[in-house]
């Protein structure tokens, strides 16, 4: 379906625990042109049966901050902050700080992730915690701050994706 921004299979979208959509420039599938194009792609993806926009900011392809946060709040989508992007310098720390400040101001929920690419990185959160602790980021905006909050998020989002599936497949 060319009208969709992601390749999440709608017919099984409510079977997953969590669905994360992340921008990955893969020519010729998706070539980054500018910030506005990436912003529009992310916002359009929020209408698909997804829960989280993974690593929304990157030095090579960042969207416009405020429209993405506004859309995430409006569409009840979570934005991810991951340790790997910070540790490897893939994202500007000041940009992450700005995103988190705006998230607090607009009540945008976030998810924390190690985004591990190797086993020794699993659960890594040192870089994220430095920023979150320094700014006293409110725990209630972090969907996975505890096991209970994570499980609540999963249950809630499965129901939301089931509704999106019904709407997109016209199963009403």
Image (cartoon, rainbow, N blue to C red):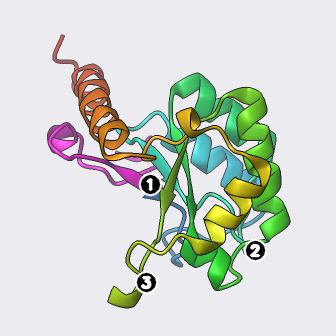
Sooner in the amino-acid sequence: mark 1 or mark 2: 1
Vertically, is 130 above or below 156? below
Q: Is residue 64 at all visible to an observer of this figure?
A: no
Of residues 50 and 107, the one nearer the viewer is 107
Q: Is residue 147 at all visible to an observer of this figure?
A: yes
Marker disc for residue 59: 2
Of residues 171 and 69, the one nearer the viewer is 69
How far is the residue under mark 1 from the one under mark 2?
18 Å
Instruction: Give coordinates of residue 167: x percent, y percent.
Output: 29, 20
Highlighted range, magenta: 1-20
Marker disc for residue 118: none
Task: Sort mark 2 into few (<14), some (14-19) or many (20+) by Cα contacts within 10 Å.
Answer: few
Magenta region includes residue 11: yes
Sooner in the amino-acid sequence: mark 1 or mark 3: 1
The quarter holding residue 96 reads bottom right
Instruction: Give coordinates of residue 86: x percent, y percent.
Output: 66, 75
Q: Name the residue under label 3.
A: 121
Of residues 25 and 121, the one nearer the viewer is 121
Quarter of the image where the C terminus is located? top left
Mark 1 and mark 3 residues within 8 Å of each other at the beta carbon = no
* In the displayed structure image, the side of residue 139 where residue 153 appears, left or right: left
Quarter of the image where the N terminus is located? top left
Residue at image point 44% right, 54% down: 21
Q: What element carries label 1?
A: strand
Q: Name the residue under label 1.
A: 21
Vertically, is 143 above or below 123? above
Q: Total number of numbered labels?
A: 3
Of residues 126 and 76, the one nearer the viewer is 126
* In the displayed structure image, the side of residue 111 where residue 130 appears, left or right: right
């Amino acid at each position: 379906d060319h009208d969709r921004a992601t390749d999440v299979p709608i017919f099984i979208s409510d079977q997953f625990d969590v669905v994360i959509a992340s921008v990955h420039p893969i020519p010729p599938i998706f070539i980054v042109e500018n910030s506005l194009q990436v912003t529009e792609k992310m916002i359009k993806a929020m209408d698909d049966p997804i829960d989280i926009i993974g690593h929304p900011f990157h030095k090579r392809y960042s969207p416009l901050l405020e429209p993405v946060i506004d859309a995430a709040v409006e569409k009840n989508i979570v934005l991810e902050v991951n340790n790997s992007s910070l540790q490897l310098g893939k994202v500007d720390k000041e940009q992450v700080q700005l995103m988190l400040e705006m998230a607090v101001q607009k009540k945008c929920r976030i998810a924390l992730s190690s985004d591990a690419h190797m086993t020794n990185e699993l659960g890594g959160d040192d870089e994220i915690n430095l920023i979150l602790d320094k700014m006293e980021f409110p725990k209630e905006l972090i969907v996975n701050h505890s096991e209970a909050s994570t499980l609540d998020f999963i249950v809630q989002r499965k129901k939301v994706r089931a509704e999106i599936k019904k709407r997109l497949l016209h199963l009403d």
